[in-house]
Image (cartoon, rainbow, N blue to C red):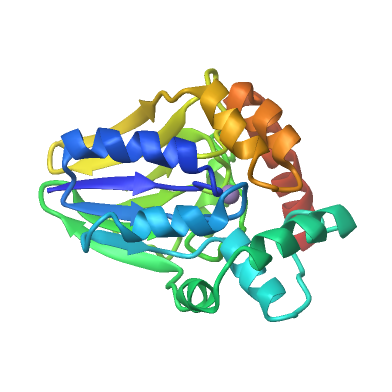
Amino acid sequence: MKIAALYDIHGNLPALNALMVELEEVQPDMIVVGGDIISGPMPGQTLQRLSQAGDHIRFIRGNADREVVRMFDGQPIERQYMANPVEKDLAEIRWVAEQLTHSQRDFLAALPEQLVVNVEGLGSVVFCHASVRNDEELFTSITPEERLLVIFSHVEQEIVVCGHTHTQFEQHVGNLRILNAGSVGMPYAARPGAYWLLLSSEGYEFRYTAYDGEAAVQEILASGYPRAQEFAKENVLTMPTAAEATEHFERIAEKYWSQEG
Ligand SMILES: [Mn+2]
């Protein structure tokens, strides 16, 4: 059995398209879309593309999807870990919400936060967006073990697959293996591309799919997305490294944990 975990696509349709072509060769038995599906340049088309993938696809909801649904419904948006959205962020979320149909809103609103799949030979796997506790909790490859023990203390499965911090990494706590699938559409990594995870009975593989960045930028700039310029420059053609992102997220996580006492 093969499962392709596609996390944090963030409306980057060109990245997703390249990956779907590669998956035609990989032929996974299941595709798990790990949340933060649409918040980016091509929200509606991204959902459409995924809906054409076949009936072996499963979805969980990410924090950004949840926020877009709240915006669609005219509800306020509050964050627990990251800074609350300022007007520029709200304008972006509003634009994404405006691209969705009612049925796309309903689809996102109805998604589960977790999914458990038993992979023969590998064990039981729980897919979540950020952590098993909620869809925005931050931890990284350098989070101390004592904190991971608290976050993952109630997990009954052998493997946790997560995303949210857009960096591929692997962590171990006791017998539990934690795998961050990385990000398809907004990776923090050494080179541009779509990052994802392949699980199978034989084990797991951190994967990477290259795509034409210049062509992607043309599509992104034509999308009308308010952050298109920034997205093209800072998320497609170049991007922060995993180490830079890790330090950034770990600082936020530390601040949160020190306040929580
Ligand atoms: Mn994300």
245 vs 8: above or below = above
Please tell me which residue is depicted at 54% across the width and 49% down the height of the picture. Answer: 11
240 vs 69: above or below = above
| Relative side of 163 to 99, left or right | left
Quadrant location of the C terminus in the rendered image: bottom right
Indicate the position of residue 34 as horizontal and vertical percent values: 43, 55
Indicate the position of residue 5 as horizontal and vertical percent values: 34, 47
Along the line of sight, the residue nearer the viewer: 161 or 7: 7
| Residue 128 seen in the figure | no
Indicate the position of residue 240 as horizontal and vertical percent values: 66, 25
| Residue 151 seen in the figure | yes
Indicate the position of residue 169 as horizontal and vertical percent values: 45, 34
- Furthest residue in direction top, as rendered: 190
- Furthest residue in direction front, as rendered: 222
**Residue 117 found in image quarter:** bottom left
Please tell me which residue is depicted at 35% across the width and 36% down the height of the picture. Answer: 19
Along the line of sight, the residue nearer the viewer: 132 or 221: 221
Q: How many marks?
A: 0
Please tell me which residue is depicted at 54% across the width and 31% down the height of the picture. Answer: 216
Please tell me which residue is depicted at 42% across the width and 64% down the height of the picture. Answer: 60
